[in-house]
Image (cartoon, grey):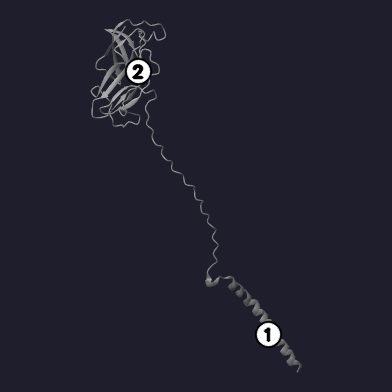
Amino acid sequence: MYRRRRLAVLLLALLIVGGIVALVVWQPWRAMTDAASQPAGGASASATPAPTSSAAPSASTPTATPSPRVTSSADGDTGAQGDGDGESDGGTASDVAPCTTGDVTVTATTDKSSYGTGELPKLSITLVNDTDLPCLINVGTAAQTFEITSGSDTWWRSTDCQSEPSDQIVQLDAGKTVTSATPIVWDRTRSAVDTCDGDRQKALPGWYNLAVTIGGIGSVEPASFTLR
């Protein structure tokens, strides 16, 4: 009876030791842990992608509005004026040709034909476009010449003592007449480039002739007048 108990105890001890060894060798808990850590379907865990920052929209560059091109005539007082619509100041079309001698008739004019003692002649220019087309002409003071002669003797020339001459290109329309805006007054003295600031010889009574040039076109014939 005693021997059977000892055999039973020994057998139980062997079973316990064998179970412990089996647990140590198999380690079923590790398999469970590995299975739990493995993603479903055997796919490996992918790293979370880093957020991609989108570039801030750049401010649009405004398109510059082209400034309108401005066309202007040269500075200076108007050298001549029309009879209402005979000319256009500035802004002339680029395809309009310059006036030539055959296009325009230039006339020298005075306000009177005879001047008494102390009366000063007023000198002007008149020009007419004789063609059917407009043309361009310089009517500024830089393009005007007034010349007074007595026979072959030149008494006075407007350019001898001229100050600050200016250009003014205008369009002379077809068939239109233009005259000086402001007449030039002759002081009845002899002019010369070296006597502008000094005493000048007084003109004697007699006949005188006025010839003019404007824009390179001369008067057809002089205007005659007398000084008394």
Residue at (33, 10) in percent of width and height: 156
Q: Quadrant of residue 164?
A: top left
Residue tagged by mark 2? Answer: 183
Q: Nearer the viewer, residue 158 or 227?
A: 227
Residue 68 in the image: above or below residue 52: above
Q: Residue furthest front?
A: 116
Amino acid type indicated by mark 2: Pro
Q: Is residue 85 left or right of residue 8?
A: left
Q: Residues within 10 Å of mark 1 (few under 14, many from 20)?
A: few
Instruction: Classify the position of the C terminus by image quarter.
Output: top left
Question: How many numbered callouts?
Answer: 2
Q: Is residue 140 left or right of residue 29?
A: left
Q: Secondary structure at mark 2?
A: loop
Label 1 to label 2: alpha-carbon separation: 146 Å
The quadrant holding residue 94 is: top left
Tell me: residue 214, above or below residue 50: above
Residue highlighted by disc 1: 15
Mark yes or no: residue 39 visible. Answer: yes
Mark 1, mark 2: which one is toward the viewer?
2
User: Which one is in front, 5 or 219?
Assistant: 219
